[in-house]
Amino acid sequence: MMARGDQTNLFEDARVCFAPMAGYSDAPARLLCFEFGADFAYTEMVSAEGLVRRGEKTICLLERMDGEGPVGVQLFGADAGVLAEAAAIVTGTSPAFIDLNFGCPVKKVIRRNGGAAIMRDLGLMGRICRAVVRSTDLPVTAKIRSGWSPAEENFMEAGRVIQDAGVAAVAIHPRFRTQGFSGVANWEHIARLRAGLSIPVIANGDVQDATDYLAMVQTTGCRIVMIGRGAYGRPWIFKEIKDALDGRISGRVGIGSRIDVLERHLRMEVEWKGERLGTVEMRKHYGWYLKGMPGIKRYRRELTSAGSLEELVRILVELREGFDGTWKKLA
Ligand SMILES: Cc1cc2nc3c(=O)[nH]c(=O)nc-3n(C[C@H](O)[C@H](O)[C@H](O)COP(=O)(O)O)c2cc1C
């Protein structure tokens, strides 16, 4: 088992990470983000109860692909004892750290007092953090929102509870639970949290490109920024950010390269989940990868209805040739 101190550099050295996103941050997506420069990543949220019951699908979420960088396993739940037990199981799989979800707005999770519901019960939040920190030698992190609602803004209090419990770093997505994903993320909240805590604060919310990244760092004073939807269909956002940190401007990613990355993503999903599930899982990604390409509707329709890897690869070949033709005509 890794000693707690072994990973502390992760939160000192890292500049950009890939967010936990249920249905998106699976192993193939994470590997792509690592290849483009993400410093660490998170699993999709994992049910602590499911783990303790040894649910097969839940356990699969802990698996990582060869070549991935440091991955934190994100747990959700509402019972400190169950979360501590789940953390001990996770520790046996040697991830880089364990993250606690205090921000999920989804009804199914809230109804069972998990996710953002815990923002309304800081006593429980403290008990969960302390129990999990005690149950593992891995660093423990937490992810919060600004509060339940504007009337219940309490990210500062939550941050102190988390820090006092021995948590190594805290990520904040500065929207209220009542907002879901609407409106804009309030970066001012991040700046205040960072100024008020001594543990690293990971800044999250609405970073779509390297310019946003630099603005986020400037506004909040945080070193680490978490990217979620900005990586949809463009995992190279991490390279753009690393280039910007080195004072370079990345070149535009051409259509051929976009299709190449899409094909690699598809092949990895199929390798990881099998042909049937892998091809179905990829359907939500096509629109993002192909966004803005002219005349893409027909290809998108074909890709989302194709049933085999062979057929999909054939469509991608046609797509590449189609675009070569289009660009030649335009040139
Ligand atoms: C489809 C989707 C799934 C998400 N799943 C999770 C999750 O499992 N755990 C979590 O802490 N946050 C989850 N989030 C929230 C993101 O981690 C992130 O906080 C949010 O999207 C804001 O960052 P962004 O503007 O960079 O996307 C999810 C967001 C989306 C859009």
Image (spheres, helix red, strand yellow):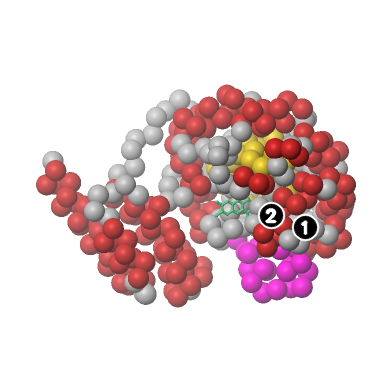
* Residue 77 placement: quadrant: bottom right
* Residue 74 placement: quadrant: bottom right
SS under mark 1: loop
The residue shown at (77%, 46%) is 119
Q: Is residue 107 in view?
A: yes
**Magenta stretch contains residue 60:** yes
Q: In the image, residue 62 lies at what x, y percent?
A: 65, 63
Q: Is residue 166 left or right of residue 70?
A: right
Q: Quadrant of the C terminus?
A: top left
How crowded pointer 1 is (Cα within 10 Å; few <14, some 14-19, many 20+) is rated as some
Which one is in front, 151 or 231? 151
The residue shown at (86%, 43%) is 165
Q: Which mark is residue 202?
A: none
Where 292 sits versus 221, above or below? below
The residue indicated by pointer 1 is 113
Magenta stretch? 46-64
Count the numbered circles shown. Answer: 2
Where 154 sits versus 143, above or below? above
Q: Determine if the C-beta at disc 2 is less than 8 A from ligand 1.
A: yes
Dot in front, 1 or 2: 1
Q: Determine if the C-beta at disc 1 is less than 8 A from ligand 1.
A: no
Looking at numbered disc 2 in the image, what kind of residue is underneath it?
Answer: Gln
How crowded pointer 2 is (Cα within 10 Å; few <14, some 14-19, many 20+) is rated as many
Q: Is residue 243 left or right of residue 55?
A: left
Which one is in front, 296 or 241? 296
**Magenta stretch contains residue 133:** no
Looking at numbered disc 1 in the image, what kind of residue is underneath it?
Answer: Asn
The residue shown at (66%, 46%) is 178
Which one is in front, 73 or 68? 73
Give how far apart the Cα atoms at labels 1 and 2 are.
17 Å
The residue indicated by pointer 2 is 74
